[in-house]
Amino acid sequence: MSGDWPYHLREHRGTLLALAGFVVMFTIYVANHPVGLNANVATTAANKGVLLAIVAMAQTLVVLTAGIDLSVGMVLVLANCLASSIVVGTPLMTALGVVGVLLVGCLCGAINGLIVIYGRLQPIVTTIATGAVYYGAALALRRVPGGDVNASLADALTGQLPGGVPASLVLLLALVLIVWLPFRRSAIGRAAYALGSSEVAAYMSGVPIRRAKLVAYTLSGLLASVAGLFVTFITYSGEASAANGSTYTLYSIAAVVLGGVSLFGGSGSAVGAIFGALMFRTIGDLLFVFNLDPLWQPLFQGVVLAAAVCLGSVRLLQVRNRLDLYG
Amino acid sequence: MGETDRPRSASGVPPGDWKAHAAPWGAAGGPAEPDPRRLLGRAARVRQHVDPAIASAFGCILVLLLLGSLYSSSFLSPEYLLQQLKVASFLGVIATGAMIVILLGQIDLSVPWVVAVGGMMATAATGWGPVGVALAIPVGVGCGVALGLVSGVGVAFLRIPSMIVTLAVNAVAQGLMVVHTGGFSPQDASSPAMRFIATGHSLFGIPNALLVWAAVGTGAVFLLTRTTFGRVVYAIGNRERAAYLSGARTRAVVMAAFAISGGLSAFGGVLLAGYASKAAQAMGDPYLLPAIAAVVLGGTSILGGRGNYLGTVAGVILITLLQSILSVMQIEEFGRHVIYGIVIIGMLLLYGRGRRHMD
């Protein structure tokens, strides 16, 4: 076991780099923040970060199987619109509403998975098309922004625990413990990694690739709906906004890449994607603490994203055989 | 032996067999010979080369027109059809660029903001005086080519997956335009030349935009079927390593393909700005998904290496007609999105399915 550490280090290099990047960015952010790190600053930052982190986890599950889920943002929007209608009223009704939203998320993910598996369509075009359907459903639920949500539940999850710890971080930790770790450690999770590395080899070895794909897509839909619930808790309302949906989809891909998850599948972890998401959010907020014109924020975020993905090509320096450059 | 790391499910073409499929309009060409046997042989060859995907796409166009004409007879009027072709031209120009990149096995997600850059820089140039008015269109297209080159360098030399490079370029382009409009408050009205190519009519009342699309399309077909560049694009889409080993200048071709895609997206933006008489920030947002959908519905494999421009033409017309008919039938916006998604999935299930593992 002790001799394995170089292997383990390499296996988790992406996650560790994302963690390091996040720590550096967050330190710069806090050091220059006019107020410094107090409980309110931490809670606001955590709520924004956790939201993207959950979407990034959802994206990771599909990316690990060498797929991509471009409908993740639209599932979020659908869950947001649904939650703003049914997560209200007495505690029992609220609980039923939450379960309903999560079930719809699972259903959306499962539909994606079934079309990819049995329809044998490419994930990228499948999820573009299903994303349009989910967005249409969201629009049917909420033609104009509005709605309501159970305020005590929303405040509990977006507020602070005794001691000033942001409740959203606990929610994120719970998702890692309840969804990600069991998946990663199960045979299905290993199958997802295997089919991401080489689907043909996994198939030949008798790995249950269909089941693994279906579980990955379904859990991705589930996590996207959790993120949709969380949006509702932050905004207290629902809005069927296509722009929001595509922004979350694009940011989730950026977070996954920053988190060291390979877009070719089979390597990386949701924990890395979480730190990638937190880092991406912190970068976006850096400009505010430096008091620059908000006009420059999108350009700054874009340039940082471009620089971060270029850093990934440092590995080219290690390539000895030029043919390895070509897939 | 010939298996790739990732299963090439949708292509169905063994690697190395790309020449047979890289001849879109070529099959029916050649000198006209009166010999009946030759004619018969040629018909057989044409039949062999009719891609089921393209046939289905054109079939769906006819079905859509029939359904539309049941609803209202004006669907078959020449005015309506010409108007649809004119609207389709904007998507057609953008989809041409998207197709060349998809043939490489890559994807260009920077379409939305490159379209906006094209439109906004062209209108901004109009505000620079008479020289700017004359140069408006080249300035817009040139900015798109520059952004495409950046993506191309990232894909060809830095070996970053195109999905993430073009995403980053999209974000940078958005940032540049936000700073540009906020900091310099440029002119956003389009020049007379832009309005002329987008809304004008030439001989026999054919919309100029359609002629522009025809020119772009002819150029693309020539490039893809009659030049080394085109052959290498198909070769890279099938197996980049093999193309590199056979001496093709893969990096230059990849860069050029992305530059063309950027230029055509920006040109689409120039046309759209001319059509609407002004440029706006979010003008490119509704064009990314339809462009990819049009290319894929036209039978081009999203994994690259196989596809035909005629199919993209069919896909563009199909998507434009579908959008038009859904809005004419006064289906509410949510219903349009749902039907749009279901039709794309349904059509792809008809003919775009990948291979089984057993094959």
Image: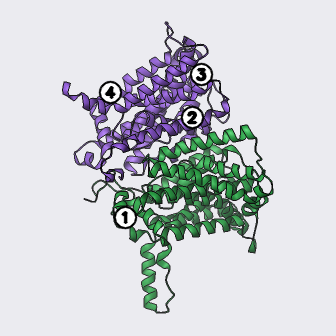
Chain colours: A purple, B green
Q: Residues within 10 Å of mark 2 (few under 14, many from 20)?
A: many
Q: Is residue B262 visible?
A: yes
Element at badge 2?
A: helix
Spatial CA span between label 4 and label 2: 34 Å
Q: Chain of mark 3?
A: A
Kind of residue at badge 4 = Pro
Asked if residue B280 is positioned above or below residue A156 in the image, the reply reads below
Q: Residue at x 50, y 38 (%)?
A: A307
Q: Residues within 10 Å of mark 3 (few under 14, many from 20)?
A: many
Q: Is residue A171 above or below residue A121?
A: above
Which tag, 4 or 2, sits closer to the chain's start? 4
Query: Which residue is drawn at the image coordinates 54% and 29% (left, top)?
Result: A283
Instruction: Tell me which chain the residue with mark 1 is part of.
Output: B
SS at circle 4: helix
Amino acid type for the residue under numbered disc 3: Val
Same chain, marks 4 and 1? Answer: no
Seen in the image, is B204 located left or right of residue B65? right
Question: Which circle marks residue A301 in the picture?
Answer: 2
The residue furthest top is A163
For the residues labelled 3 and 2, the Cα–Cα distance comes to: 32 Å
Q: Is residue B6 above or below residue B46?
A: above
